[in-house]
Amino acid sequence: MKKCLLLTVTTLLFSVAATFGQKMGEGDGKVDIGAIKKKMEQSNADIQDPSKNGKWATWLTRGDVFLEAAVAPTKGLYNSLPESELGKLYPGGFKDREPVTFGGTKFKVKENDRFVVYVVDSGKKEERKVSMWEEKLVLDSMALDIAADAYDKAFALDMKAAERAYKGMDEIVKMVKNNAAMAQRLGQYGKAAREYRRSYILQTYPAYAVLRKVDIVVDSTDLFYAAMNFAGSQDFVSALECLRELVSMQYCDKDGDIYYYLYNSYRGVDKEDSARMYLLEGARKFPQASRLYSSLPIIYLIDGDADITEIEPIMQKAFENKEEKDKGRLYFLMGQAYYKRKMDDKALDYYIKASKEDPDDFSIQYSIAQIYMIKAADKVQELQEVSENLPKDEYDKAQEGVYDFYKKAIPYLEKAHKLDPKHPTVVELLADLTFRLRDTSDEMMEKSKKYGDLNKAMKAEQGGGEEQ
């Protein structure tokens, strides 16, 4: 059953009304707005006439008329049109807007009564060419959809309309695809999403799908692009509608990006379980897809109740990936996920691996020290529970075990201090730990004095700042 975009014959949205009696442009850019308006009004009257409504020619003509209305505002424009040709096609002059930059490319922006045009600003006059545009003059906001319904109706009434109906539909689909691509480049993600979805739906019309002589009748990639742009505009509900339809048709791109957008969109509607399920499924099917496996530690960090062991095989393959440039961050995130589950040994193992990959990251150095201090605190707790029953030599040995963890923490705290010399917590911890260990060696005594003095100075400075 055809998915109609609209059922309207009278809703016309006219703007720049003063232009409707005018002939605009020259050459390929020339349009007669008044004549097009009269044709539209006549077509609306014809389909209300019982003697004409059932004729395929009535609907075919209607398709041509409304397609002409849709094309009219930007008639003559095309990608790579030299800027020098604009004045010839559209006399009357252009007003310059502020230049803009998209995707690292700078564009000159010009406008007239019909459209805004974006010209690649290469600096060389002969190389400045039209790249994108936006309509200002709108004869009917639904003209393309009315034209598509009309062509499809003509095709349904008689196969004599087939060839012209298909050509009209093909032009409409190409126009909608182009509008979608331009909107995406302009960062208008909501508009791009709607246009891509419209392109997908238009391709299901019998006047297009039946007559199109290709293996793939409907380009499902357009539906995926719609989902991608809906997600980009934070409309996750619409994104999921598109994605679910893609899943139902077993669509899958070569990089597994559909799973990433399912994950992202389910998170957007606060359905973390579904998000995790699709992310995990995608990462298993596409173990080399960085955007999938790199998100796994994040969602398992957020959901501390999820079984983290199920992502270990996937992450191990990721760490073996020679193309992966961000292993330090991934090791660190895995460490955090294990730390949240109070699995300190696993967390420490990942933190140390992260440190080897990225020795200049403050958070990694601090986290390693934190684990060692936790282990020391656990030892202290154990010692307090049995200290009354321990002989002195065993107590001293146990105390040495506490000191060993403190000693392991200090080098990482010192690295963190070097990376952020003004971090007060790090200095305070260094002062505390080295003081506890001051009698273990001359070196530790010197460090105790150094960090103790620094800690006092920083506290005095902070206190002075508060007093002022």
Image (spheres, grey):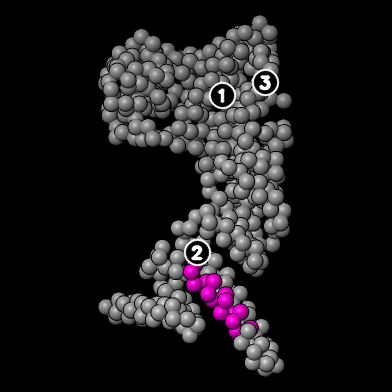
Q: Where does label 1 land, which residue?
A: 145
Above or below residue 120? Residue 84 is above
**The stretch drawn in magenta includes residue 405:** yes
Q: Nearer the viewer, residue 383 or 335?
A: 383
Q: Which of 146 and 182 is in front in this view?
A: 182
Q: Which of marks 1 and 2 is in front?
A: 2
**Image x and y of residue 331, in percent:** 58, 55
Q: Please report the residue visible at 42 percent of the width from the left and 68 percent of the height from the top.
A: 417
Instruction: Give left or right: position of 446 versus 86.
Output: right
Kindly identify the amino acid type of the residue bearing the numbered disc 3: Ile
Q: Which of marks 3 and 1 is nearer the N terminus?
A: 1
Q: Where does label 3 land, which residue?
A: 216
The residue range painted magenta reads 398-412
Q: Nearer the viewer, residue 444 or 168?
A: 444
Secondary structure of residue under mark 1? helix
Q: Distance between the residues labelled 2 and 3?
A: 54 Å
Kindly identify the amino acid type of the residue bearing the numbered disc 1: Asp
Where the N terminus falls, by quadrant? top right
Secondary structure of residue under mark 3? loop
Q: Residue 24 carries which label?
A: none
Q: Main secondary structure of the magenta part?
A: helix
Q: Where does label 2 land, which residue?
A: 365
Kindly identify the amino acid type of the residue bearing the numbered disc 2: Gln
Q: How far apart are marks 1 and 2 (CA)?
A: 60 Å
